[in-house]
Amino acid sequence: MSRSCLPSRAVADRPGLRGRALTGLVLSAALALGPCLTPMAARAQDSGGISLIRDTEIEETLHVDADPIFRAAGLVPKDMTLMLVGDKDLNAFTVNGQAIFVNTGLIVETANPNQLEGVLAHETGHAAGGHSARSGDMEKAAMAPFLMTLGLGVLAAAAGAPDAAIALIGSSQYFGVINMLTFSRAQEAAADQAAITYMERAGKSSRGLVEFFENFRYEEVFSEARRFKFFQSHPVSGERIELLRRRAEEQPHYNVTDSPEDMARHEVMKAKLFAFMNPPQQTFIKYTEKDTSYPARYARAIAYYKALETEHAIRDIDALIADYPTNPYLYELKGQVWFEVGKSALAEQAHARSVELKPGAPLLRINLAQAIIAQGDVKRTDEAIGHLQKALAVEGDNAFAWRLMSQAYDAKGEPGAARLAAAEERFAVGDMTQARIFALRARQLLTKDTPQWRRATDIVLVSNPSKDDLRMMAGQPGLAAPTH
């Protein structure tokens, strides 16, 4: 069964970066919504594209690492957005002081959680310091709203698995943004010092940040074109490292080490990312059958899934579930495997168990709703809608949830609600033209003065309506709603 594209929230769901909020800034630019693309990760990188990954397990791990740092900086963790970029290059950057983007390649290269935390603390220093890129206000950057994809499907797509979804942003937009993210030496130094302060307040060692810079000290000798992107925008020098080291070694928590639990969580995250972002054979070489650790077994199960060896993948996943029966992400992976081969009923069973184990995770509920809808039983449409409503109560800007909602209402024979959901989806990804068209149609089909009708009206009013649109809304004769 062919899998549909899986767009999710626009750049973030915070004021100033919000994709769907009626009062928030919509970062607008060309946003292609054509057929799903399933290139190899290498192809995506060669073309300059960028893919944003949604995965509940990895996002949870990143927040465990970052939230104490955010609090130490006086920031509210729930107001900060951590975005995972499917790119093997080392990079991390901050946008608008509220969103930190981290490349998968950077995570995989970190030896321990403390090194990753050091980088996150440095980026938090830029965010908390209100640092502006040298080229001007980031809100004026040519940064398109990102299409983000759901759960494991996007990871598979980024690695070349068939029928999975990936969202790509053109090279000119991506590299244009990267070029804007170059801070002054003074800002870099301030972010370094702030990072040490935040790590110390959080009871963590600053050693990781020093180690991270030291590990890539040779970057100084590379030309600008050959350097990792992180070191293009964050130039490192021996003097800078020494200043960092001296202050870090003075801190009381310098010798604090990562707990076994933190190390285990970090290794699982690295194994999962490596397995999804690389060809299966590379995973089998890195995580051999002799390695019976949980991360290695997890990585191999993913590799078998990517290699289209479904039976082997399910067998390995079931073995993991037997040992870790309360891990929701193993059931999520099992559901993804079944869904990708068109076995939606089996996928539903697995996704239902993942939701039972972690009911507050919106992406898991969206997976479950998708599996239910895919079975084509109209009698169960309300069940799927219920899961989507619960997911949207947490992630109101999740465009893929709105797309599924539109499909579900169409199946129920409620075209007004379906068009409103389609308008919400278009609005979430910053496509104001289509959002307005769908919202205008929804107004014609919904009962006047209901909450849904008012919501459709709001979308029209903030989506650059024409004078004809406004006259039509006012009920003037001779004007008809678009037929979409």
Image: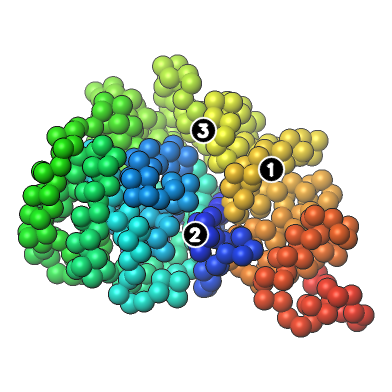
- What kind of element bears circle 3? helix
Q: Which residue is mark 1?
A: 389
Q: Tag 3: residue type?
A: Glu
Relative horizontal placement of residue 450, taking residue 199 as reference (left or right): right
Q: Residues within 10 Å of mark 2 (few under 14, many from 20)?
A: many
Q: Tell me, for residue 11, which label it has, or none.
A: 2
**Residue tagged by mark 3?**
332
Assign a secondary structure to mark 1: helix
Compared to 375, does 175 lie above or below?
A: below
What residue type is disc 2 on?
A: Val
Say which label, 3 or 1, has the lower sequence index. 3
Q: Quadrant of the C terminus?
A: bottom right
Q: Position of residue 45 (x, y in %)?
A: 34, 60
Residue drawn at x 44%, y 48% is: 76
**Which residue: 67% across, 76% down?**
464
In the figure, is residue 443 to the left or right of 109? right
Q: Give the mark toward the camera: 3 or 1.
A: 1
Upstream in sequence: badge 3 or badge 2:
2
Q: How is the image coloured?
A: rainbow
Circle 2 — which element?
loop
Q: Position of residue 321 (x, y in %)?
A: 46, 21
Specify the amino acid type for callout 1: Gln
Query: Which of the pair 30/342 is nearer the observer?
Result: 30
Alpha-carbon neighbours of circle 3 within 10 Å: few (<14), some, or many (≥20)?
many
Real-space Cα separation, disc 3 to disc 2, in angstroms:
24 Å
